[in-house]
Image: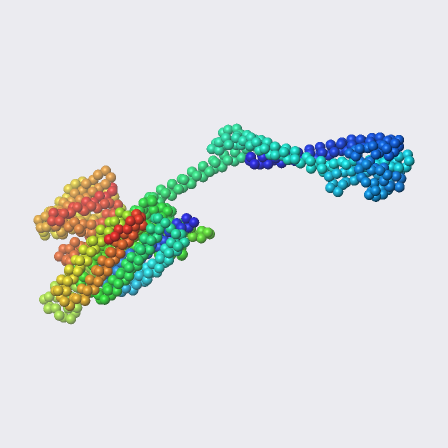
Amino acid sequence: MRSRFDEQLMLLNKEMIEMGALCEEAIELVAKALETNNVEIYKKVRPISLEIDQKEKDIEARCMKLLLQQQPVAKDLRQISAALKMITDMERIGDQAEDIAEIIGYLNGENRNNSVPVQEMAKATIKMVTESIDAYVNKDVALAEAILKEDDIIDEYFMESKRRLIKMVAENPENGEYALDLLMVAKYFERIGDHATNIAEWVIFSVTGVHEEA
Amino acid sequence: MKKKIFQSILRVTIVILFISLILITGVLHNYFQKIQNQQLKEELALASLGVEEGEMQYLSGLEEHNNRITWIDSNGNIRFDNQADITKMENHSDREEFMEAIETGFGSSSRHSVTLTENTVYEAKLLSDGTVLRISMNQKSILALLLGLIQPFGIILILAVVVAYFIAEKVARQIIEPLDEVDLEHPLREESYEELAPFLKRIHYQKKQIRWQLEELNQKKLEFEQVISHMKEGLILLDAKDQIISINPAAMELFQTTLECIGNDFLSVERKQKLTQTIEKAREEGWGQTRFEKNNREYQFDVTGIRTEKGLIGSVILAFDVTEQKNAEKMRREFSANVSHELKTPLQSIIGSAELLQNNLVKNEDVPRFIGHIHTEASRLVVLIEDIIRLSELDEERELQKEELSLYQIVNDVLKSLQDKANERNIKLEITGDEGQMTGVYRLLHEVIYNLCENAIKYNVDHGSVRVCIEERQTKVGITVEDTGIGIPKEHQSRVFERFYRVDKSHSKKTGGTGLGLSIVKHAVSYQNGTVELISEEGKGTKVEIWFPK
């Protein structure tokens, strides 16, 4: 009985990592597209986002089944409930990557974003998402705690972007639409950072049983 | 063991008990019957005497608890019975003992009662008056005797069980003790039951075999581990569930993990979609390949699914560092682009001049200048093509004629031919050192020294100097070309040996040259198994040091 349960927990773990890998891939694609001004990126990100949605449903069903059939307690229960919360965050990351891809399409290959640290934001976000999934994979509480601090860097980047974009619009009002699009991209990255923070919090919860309120 | 011994003891006891019971009861029963019959007959004889003497008086004097006596007349009617009411008794003329007595004088018979546990024995005697006196006695049948013995027999049985249990325990212990003491590590060392000898011999032999096979297995495992741990390529073995069975140090470094990952899912080590999909593909189709960047280097992953008759049992991932290969590919691409560019530039210039001449757009006095221009550009092209041919010759690694030669001699020749060029800019040429005897290809060495000295002059400052020093050692010969020129900036030093690489990006025509000189030097030196070292400081000069084996 127990071995069957362990096997199912392992499968759950595997699916979680797969879902995490999909999220990483989605935002990496988006970041690369931002760098190369690839307007077509939406077509590539969309299927990944759909796959992430499907994974969320699969994992949710698996968790429910485990909760009902095995009635886990203590650490097992924490792992499953943390997984249930984490997939929501991961699904949001996928959606936001898709949203960014859509906006890149609107930018029409214009590259005036040198003034805004979007590249740096993308890099910092990728790092956070990768680390949060690494923390989950290795049950690494120290790494998860480090991620919580990294979120401040992204927030700072966002504020900086906002300041520069305001300046940009003030100097050249015709740049308004572009500036707004870029602000959206920055905001989405900032949100992805928040979701990565959430994942890290749930990792800490699943290991220690204490959920930190950010 | 104990149980078996117990069971057999008990079984034997029960069988013996039964047989002796039956035999004893049978013999005893027979004996008692005989005695009883004898008694009965004597009693009959006594009674018949009594009846003949005193008739009824004797009979009625008999007490009731004696054996039953019946007096029957010659017709079978009952005259007297001491235990039953004669009026209710039927005619006895058809009784066996009666008929026998009438005929022979004596008669006897026995009849079983209804319950079978009793047996009635009758003895009859014909009296002198023709009447018959019968005496009968109830005997217990053999069955009744047996039934009576059941209780004591049961007690004996219980006793037998208990005794058998203790005996079995003891016997089993005695038998097992030497067996327990057999040293299975060294089965032949101590004496034991001789019945066990073949068994122990076999164990001994098998132990030897196992030890031998284990050693062989360990040896093979060690060899395998040695091989994979010294492999430059990363190697990972996965089982059918994608859990890691084995990982070599190269792969551990690549995926930044430790031996602890063994037994974990491969996804926990690397979750790159490309690789996951390739593993999936290898499981289905048997083979898959992918490439991606990891730790700032390009890796190629070959995944092979391992199948046996039982189905998929796992997969092997082999990781190659293909960064060099990728760079080489990039360089090759750049090379072709550079070659076409370098070839096209002089040609364009020639075509331009030729077109002007063709359309008579050139003044007569300018014609020689244009033709001169065409000539220089064409010569440049020839030099370039010659360089490329030389390089590709070196690339092909054809076997070239080697001979004994003196480096000093070559340097001397080269410097002589470059003297004019040096004089133009007042550059001092100097040669020092040993004779530099070695075996080599004259043409290549000449080329190497020529290119180096030419560069040393070309990239020198006016009134500078070039020093060539030859040094002969036990096994190798060195040549150092040192100038006081403009030097090579640090960031370019590692790339100057690349084809068409120019520090001066404008490919300026001022200094001339094709950008292939140092590339040819590098190839020619490596053809002779030598080494090149470049030491340079911007603005101070460049020193190139080459060592050839003798």
Q: Nearer the viewer, residue A50 or B82?
A: B82
Q: Residue B362 at what x, y percent from top left?
A: 12, 68
Q: Residue B373 at what x, y percent from top left?
A: 14, 62
Residue B17 drawn above or below residue B502: above
Residue B416 drawn above or below residue B213: below
The residue positioned farthest toward the bottom in the image shown: B359
Q: For the point 9% across and 66% down, which residue is it?
A: B365
Residue B192 drawn above or below residue B374: above
In the rendered image, is residue B152 in sight? Answer: yes
Q: For the point 43% across and 52% down, which residue is it?
A: B312
Which quadrant of the figure has residue B213? Answer: top left
Q: Nearer the viewer, residue A103 or B387?
A: A103
Q: Quadrant of the N terminus of chain B?
A: top right
Q: Residue A193 at what x, y percent from top left?
A: 24, 56
Q: Residue B342 at what x, y percent from top left?
A: 20, 59
In the rendered image, is residue B507 in sight? Answer: no
Q: Nearer the viewer, residue A149 or B465?
A: A149
Q: Nearer the viewer, residue B417 or B430?
A: B430
